[in-house]
Image (tube, coloured by chain):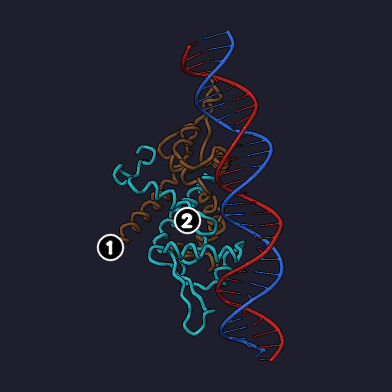
Chain colours: A cyan, B brown, C blue, D red
Amino acid sequence: MDECSPKMITPNECQGICKDFHSTIEFIGKRWVGVIIYSLLQGPKRYHQILAEIPGISDRLLTERLRDLEKEGLIIKRVDKTSQKKVEYELTSAGKELEKVIAAIMHWIQQKGKSQYQ
Amino acid sequence: MDECSPKMITPNECQGICKDFHSTIEFIGKRWVGVIIYSLLQGPKRYHQILAEIPGISDRLLTERLRDLEKEGLIIKRVDKTSQKKVEYELTSAGKELEKVIAAIMHWIQQKGKSQYQ
DNA sequence: GAAATAAGCTTACTATTAGTTAGTTTATTC
DNA sequence: GAATAAACTAACTAATAGTAAGCTTATTTC
């Protein structure tokens, strides 16, 4: 009980969250997941667009992570009816709500940057 | 320029942030880093306390991650003057400010959980 | 006060995950 | 109709994580 309750959550909010927190942070923290979501927050994108925008990622890992994100319900894959080579990836509403998490991270980076030059 | 600006930041906020964002999310998303910070948000703790509270982590990796976190300035290691076997790890102010990121993740988990049963 | 236990690691090894290279299939462009 | 591109997939190597054992310095127990 007490090993899973930092100050910001009350004990009875703590039931399922602690297990979930671990798996969630491990999932969204998996290599490239954050930057893929960050990229898709701008709007739906095609496979090679994402690949080009994320320097360093390999195509194999991009495919793997897109599948993971799809399975988790954070993105949807749209294949064009006329051509199965036109594929678009779009965040679901759950995926879009991660914007707040990403915003919190960016806010933290900015704060940290400032305090270094104080 | 446009490949690194989701809607929530303005173009001129985007200068150093985009490079930083990638490295930051890859760092705090590294396996176990999130749960270690989560655990230390409750207050300073000793090595074996953390080890016992995080099921699944190995002692080798805990040591490695504690060193990483120290190097990044997110935690400090305090060794007792009387015995070098009394070691405590404590979040720095930068480390403590990650509470907001963690709160955002927990909020996201709760929202997601709710929407499944709507 | 010696022997046993515990804290906080370190080293050596195996298993898993990531990255690289090459190749495949369906569209589109020249 | 040949060449290029999109979106993968497979096979392989490199890097990272996990496991098991041991080491050193307290502290506790008898």
Q: What separation in Å lies between label 1 and label 2 (alpha carbons)?
A: 24 Å
Q: Residue at x 50, y 45 (%)?
A: B32
**Which secondary structure, mark 1?**
loop
Q: Nearer the viewer, residue C5 or B44?
A: C5
User: How far across and down, in percent of the image, does residue C1 sit?
Assistant: 58, 8
Neighbourhood count class around disc 1 (C-alpha, 10 Å): few under 14, some 14–19, many 20 upward: few
Asked if residue B107 is positioned above or below residue A75 in the image, the reply reads above
Q: Image quadrant for the N terminus of chain A? A: top left
Q: Which mark is residue A28?
A: 2
- Amino acid type, callout 1: Gln
Residue A58 as seen in the image, left or right of residue A17: right
User: How far across and down, in percent of the image, does residue A97 sit?
Assistant: 39, 61
Q: Which mark is residue A41?
A: none
In the picture of the structure, the residue carrying the numbered disc 1 is B118
Q: Nearer the viewer, residue A92 or A103?
A: A92
- Amino acid type, callout 2: Ile
Q: Nearer the viewer, residue B22 or A4?
A: A4
Circle 2 chain: A
Neighbourhood count class around disc 2 (C-alpha, 10 Å): few under 14, some 14–19, many 20 upward: many
Asked if residue A111 is positioned above or below residue C12 in the image, the reply reads below
Circle 1 chain: B
User: How far across and down, in percent of the image, does residue A20 sit?
Assistant: 39, 50
Q: Residue at x 38, y 49 (%)?
A: B103
Same chain, marks 1 and 2?
A: no
Q: Residue at x 59, y 65 (%)?
A: A60
